[in-house]
Amino acid sequence: MSVLGSEHSSAARSVLVFSAAALAVTDLLVKAALVQALGHDRHNTDFGLFTVWLAYDTGAGFSPLSWLPPGALVLGAVLLVAVLAAALVRSAPRLRKPALSAAALLLGGALGNLADLLDGAGVVDYLHTGWLPSSNLAGVFVVAGAGLLVLGTVRGAVREGQ
């Protein structure tokens, strides 16, 4: 591998890790600010498309695993995020800028919700639409990042096949 290739690999990985960390911190700061402002009450603030109030998801990704003991849920989440992080960091040098941004969104959201899960109270959800499960900024990052990463991968494969 050339020095330029090595520098590109390192730069792409650094951009991914730094961006994901910044997104996770942003998510955690928003959650902390809302918990501080609202306490544990369900104060409703209606913004039209969504309502803000606090809820705690103890079952990972819209609560399907709420029956699991908290330790098992945390262990599973740590393993899942570790595998995701390893795969994305490894592939970062091959990703184009839009896909790298999508990977940062996906990893940042996963890290934000993982960090929130570690205290045992559950992930703080605060975005309620009435037509989608309750979520938070990290959830938005995960869904947007995954969707954009798939779209970027499919579009890249189509272009290469032409």
Image (cartoon, rainbow, N blue to C red):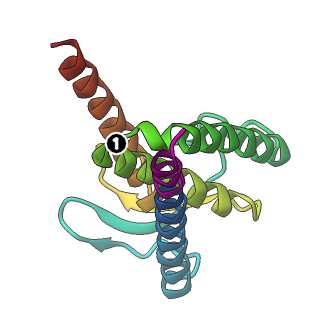
Q: Tell me where the magenta segment starts and ends, as one range.
A: 1-13
Q: Is any atom of residue 139 visible in this view? A: no
Q: Which residue, as the protein is rendered here, is positioned at the far left?
A: 162
Which amino acid does the dot numbered 1 rest on? Ala
Q: In which quarter of the image is residue 127?
A: bottom left
Residue at the spot 58% in from the left edge and 76% down from the top edge: 40
Q: In which quarter of the image is residue 72?
A: top right
Q: In this view of the protein, which residue sits in the foreground, 41 or 124?
A: 124
Is 35 placed above or below 52 here? below
Q: Is any atom of residue 79 visible in this view? A: yes
Q: Quadrant of residue 79?
A: top right
Residue 46 drawn in magenta: no
Say which element carries label 1: helix
Say which quadrant the N terminus sits in. top right
Residue 47 pos. (x, y %): 22, 70
Q: In this view of the protein, which residue sits in the foreground, 54 or 14?
A: 14
Residue at the spot 47% in from the left edge and 75% down from the top edge: 30
Residue 91 pos. (x, y %): 51, 37
Residue picked out by circle 1: 99
Residue 80 pos. (x, y %): 67, 38
Is 128 placed above or below 26 here? above
Is 159 placed above or below 68 here? above
**Left or right: where 94 falls relative to 111:** left
Residue 9 drawn in magenta: yes
Say which quadrant the C terminus sits in. top left
**Left or right: where 150 falls relative to 55:** left
